[in-house]
Amino acid sequence: MNKAKHKGILLVISGFSGAGKGTLVKKLISEYDNYALSISMTTRNPRVGEEHGREYFFATKEEFEHKITEDGFIEHACYCGNYYGTPKDYVESMLAAGKDVILEIEIQGAMKVKEQYPQALLLFVVPPSAEELKRRLIGRGTETEEVIDARLKRAYEESQGIEQYDYLVINDDLDRCVNELHNIVLSEHNRPDRNEAFIEKIREELKSFSFEK
């Protein structure tokens, strides 16, 4: 008898600016169909080319604040006068459908998610070295030396929280890294604490065999 369909795993992916986590997530989603990227809700106006339900769920301030009162967000914050948040209903519907849902957020948000979802899988993406991180930041060609220095300082501060994550993902080669991350998720699906219903089912089947004679 085939094993029952897995409920999805909530994946929280964090990492230094310049570590390549955004590129990693895009490639993971493009190569495997079992992942879904969480869509945030925001009160800011849509930019040209953005669509409701694709880049963001766009809402009024009143709608967003009403959802806060209903405990409708996994985490939320206000930046530059606009709200941003991760809707619970969207994430939980995707998990129930068997999708592994990805939240790409920073450390503080990751810890809030872990409080609400103890089985969430936390992954921290790093480059192979600090020198490589600096090289990637410079290679963007979009930031001043002062901004790069600030990002490196922030990376040092974030490095103090890496031990709170379940896995460290070293992004030295993109294809290898995507494959490694996917294999981590596959292994997690086979943990006994994620398969309690299946274990109980097979236990009962075995019990029936043992009492046949």
Image: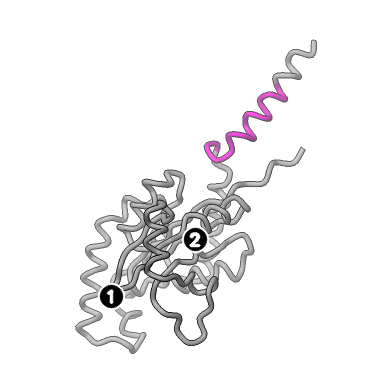
> Is residue 13 toward the left or the right of residue 89 in the image?
left
Residue 72, how many percent across, how many down? 43, 54
* Within-10-Å neighbours for mark 2: few <14, some 14–19, many 20+: many
Q: Which residue is mark 2?
A: 102
Q: Which residues are magenta?
A: 192-206
- Residue nearest the viewer, comparing 192 with 196: 196
Residue at left 36%, top 65%? 15
> Is residue 58 toward the left or the right of residue 18 in the image?
right
Could you tell me how many numbered marks the image carries?
Answer: 2
Task: Decide whether the magenta segment is chiefly helix, strand or loop.
Answer: helix
Residue 199, how many percent across, how many down? 62, 32
Residue at left 33%, top 75%? 132
Q: Which residue is mark 1?
A: 80
Q: Amino acid at mark 2?
A: Ile
Instruction: Say if the magenta span includes residue 194.
Output: yes
Residue at left 51%, top 55%? 89
* Within-10-Å neighbours for mark 1: few <14, some 14–19, many 20+: few
Residue at left 59%, top 50%? 96
Dot 1 falls on a residue whose secondary structure is loop
- Residue nearest the viewer, comparing 71 with 113: 71
Q: Residue furthest right?
A: 213
Image quadrant where one finds the C terminus? top right
Q: Which mark is residue 167?
A: none
